[in-house]
Amino acid sequence: MTVRTTRQLGAVLEAVNLRRDHPTAQEVYARVRQRLPRISRGTVYRNLSKLQQQRQIRIVRLAGRPARYDAVVHEHDHFVCEGCSAVEDLVTGNGRHPGAVDLRASGYVLRRRSITYFGLCPRCALCAKEG
Ligand SMILES: [Zn+2]
């Protein structure tokens, strides 16, 4: 890899990592451009898929919403606020997966789990109550 491609890849990774707020590809592009104003959208998107292949980031697919990118690559759940559209990480504690035992007993082979909760974050819930 050239110095330039390494720098571009690093800038994309940093843009995802920076605030842990699960940015969309469009948001990553906007952030990277603040540092590398001449980078193209295609380069940013290519680097996002390269980082994903290298398992340095992962993609969070949310039904009916643009995909988000996540710098936390171990298995974890998400909460999507329908008020402010924030996507937050949920800590899964002891790693027990409800329902997994039943699925295994029925002959399913579980490879990964991804649970997304939808609702209102505490801040939006407060606004809804007051409003
Ligand atoms: Zn996450």
Image: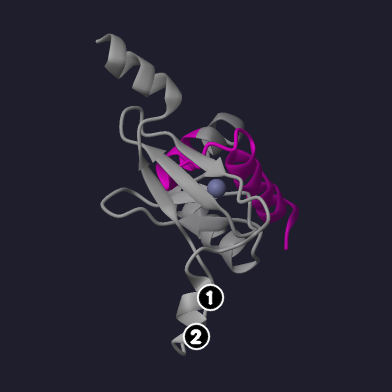
Outermost residue toward the top in this view: 130
Disc 1 crowd, CA 10 A, few/some/many (<14, 14-19, 20+): few
Depth check: 5 or 69 in front? 69
The magenta stretch spans residue 16: yes
Q: Is residue 31 magenta?
A: no
**Is the C-beta separation of discs 1 and 2 under 8 Å?**
yes
Residue 112 seen by the camera = yes
* Residue 87 left/right relative to 112: left
Q: What element carries label 2?
A: helix
Magenta region: which residues? 1-30
Residue holding disc 2: 105
**In front of the other: 33 or 123:** 123
Q: Magenta stretch mostly in which secondary structure? A: helix
> Relative to 57, does residue 27 appear above or below in the rendering?
above
- Residue type at mark 1 is Val
Q: Which residue is drawn at 45% across and 38% down?
A: 27
Quarter of the image with the C terminus is top left
Label 1 lies in ligand 1 vicinity (Cβ under 8 Å): no
Judging by the rendered image, the residue that carries numbered circle 1 is 101
Q: Is mark 2 within 8 Å of ligand 1?
A: no
**Residue at image point 30% right, 48% down:** 65
For badge 2, the amino acid type reads Ala
Q: Is residue 128 left or right of residue 77?
A: left
Which SS class for mark 1?
helix
- Indicate the position of residue 121 as horizontal and vertical percent values: 42, 29
Q: From the top left corner, tell me how far across and down residue 64 is, in percent.
A: 26, 52
